[in-house]
Amino acid sequence: MRHVAALGVALIGSVLALACSRDRIDVQHAHANGAGLVRTYDVGFDTAWRAAHEALRWSGAGTPTDHLDQHYVVTNDPSSPAPSYGQQVGVWLEPLAATQTRVTVVVLESTTTADTGGPDERGVQKDIEKAVSMIVSGQPLPDKRP
């Protein structure tokens, strides 16, 4: 009986692990297939990276998971402490020159979160633009969207 219970727990754990990883793969797949809104900013990678994080925080997009070595950050659904089938926001940063970075924002929503009024690609890009402007001008970055 214990063997059956242990097998059941292992099966449930495997299903949950697979479910938790799906959206991150979907966001990456969408980006790899050309999805997203692209903007180029006349700032270096470090400034764009900082601005992207501020924009995600301002938009309430969820907890970011950094992939600095791969130049992207992805968030989980803000109502979930772990990756989920809810809304995902991914931001990819491509250094073009020492003072120029291309930023792509991809937002994916499940059918259950499509009408929640969460962040969209245009809104995240506007927030990144605002954060870049504030950083470049030396203004302090507020806790909430200016």
Image (cartoon, rainbow, N blue to C red):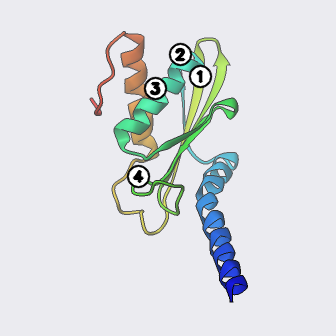
Q: CA distance from mark 2 to mark 1?
A: 6 Å
For discs 1 and 3, the disc positioned in front in the rendered view = 3
Q: CA distance from mark 1 to mark 4?
A: 27 Å
| 141 horizontally vs 61: left or right | left
For discs 3 and 2, the disc positioned in front in the rendered view = 3
Label 1: element kind: strand
Label 3: element kind: helix
Q: Which residue is mark 2?
A: 43
Disc 1 crowd rating (10 Å Cα; few below 14, some 14-19, many 20+) is many
| Marks 3 and 2 close (CB-CB < 8 Å) | yes
Query: What residue type is disc 4 on?
Result: Pro
Q: Which residue is mark 4?
A: 78
For discs 1 and 4, the disc positioned in front in the rendered view = 4
Percent position of residue 86, x then y: 48, 61
Q: Which residue is mark 1?
A: 101
Q: Which residue is mark 3?
A: 51
Quick one: label 1 or label 3, which is nearer the N terminus? 3
Label 4: element kind: loop
Query: What residue type is disc 1 on?
Result: Thr
Percent position of residue 136, x then y: 42, 12
Quick one: label 4 or label 2, which is nearer the N terminus? 2
Query: Which quadrant does the N terminus fall into?
Result: bottom right
